[in-house]
Amino acid sequence: MRGAGLQLSTLAVLHLHAKGPGIDYVGVLIASFASWVGLPGPGEAALIAAGISAAHHHLDLTSLIAVAWIGATAGGMAGWIVGVRGGRGVLTAPGPLRTLRLALTERGDRFYERYGMVAVLFTPSWIAGIHNMHWSRFVPVNVVSALVWATAIGFGAYTIGPSITDIANDAGLAGVLLVAAAITIAAIVVLRRRFGRSN
């Protein structure tokens, strides 16, 4: 199913290319925005197709990555705003399973309070909004993660083609392991400092 979606999105972007490179950039901008708001799939597929097109000298790679970065950053902000403005109200509204929803919301709030900077990397942006992650913490992570995504996928498609999808999927686990290692190292440093002061 995912492969079919990638193929359809690729065909759509390549079809748009027939109308001019400006349309390709707009398509990548919109698809990146949609993906980072929370709609899975179109941003990555469009960026891969456009990266391959850039490898054939139909698009400028730097401009492509910049457009994808802008779209992803704006989409992440829009998703966060949706979560802040409406998501929490929907989640805590009276109705079925309200007690369970309130308990989950409270647990999510505590999680985002402690690990929000890391959680943003692994959850849709609107979830950060639902859990009231302050904009001063959300914005920098959103901007940097959008840049890493746009650069990795765009440059990867430019250099190695469609197989970047497999690499990105495999890097998901590697990414989790790297973050877990970073958290472990940070925890060890904090514990050593605390125990060092008490001795």
Image (cartoon, rainbow, N blue to C red):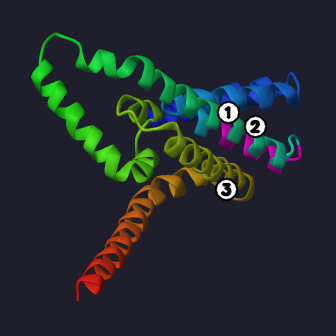
Label number found at residue 71: 1
Which residue does the numbered mark 3 point to in the structure image?
156
Mark sitting earlier along the chain (3/1): 1
Tell me the distance, in whole angstroms, between the alpha carbons under discs 3 and 2. 16 Å
Asked if one can make out residue 35 in the rendered structure from this viewpoint, the answer is no
- In reply to whether residue 47 is colored magenta, the answer given is yes
Label number found at residue 67: 2
The correct choice, above or below, for 21 with respect to 107 in the image is: above
Q: The magenta stretch spans which residues?
A: 45-57
Residue 101: image quadrant is top left
**Element class at badge 3:** helix
Q: Amino acid at mark 2?
A: Val
Mark sitting earlier along the chain (3/2): 2
Tell me the distance, in whole angstroms, between the alpha carbons under discs 3 and 1. 18 Å
Label 1 CA crowd tier, 10 Å (few <14, some 14–19, many 20+): many
Quadrant assignment for the C terminus: bottom left
Q: Amino acid at mark 3?
A: Gly
**Element class at badge 2:** helix
Q: Is residue 62 left or right of residue 141?
A: right
Tell me the distance, in whole angstroms, between the alpha carbons under discs 2 and 1. 6 Å
Label 3 CA crowd tier, 10 Å (few <14, some 14–19, many 20+): many
- In reply to whether residue 22 is colored magenta, the answer given is no
**Element class at badge 1:** helix
Residue at 68% from the left image edge and 58% from the top image edge? 160
For the residue pair 193 and 47, the one nearer the viewer reads as 193
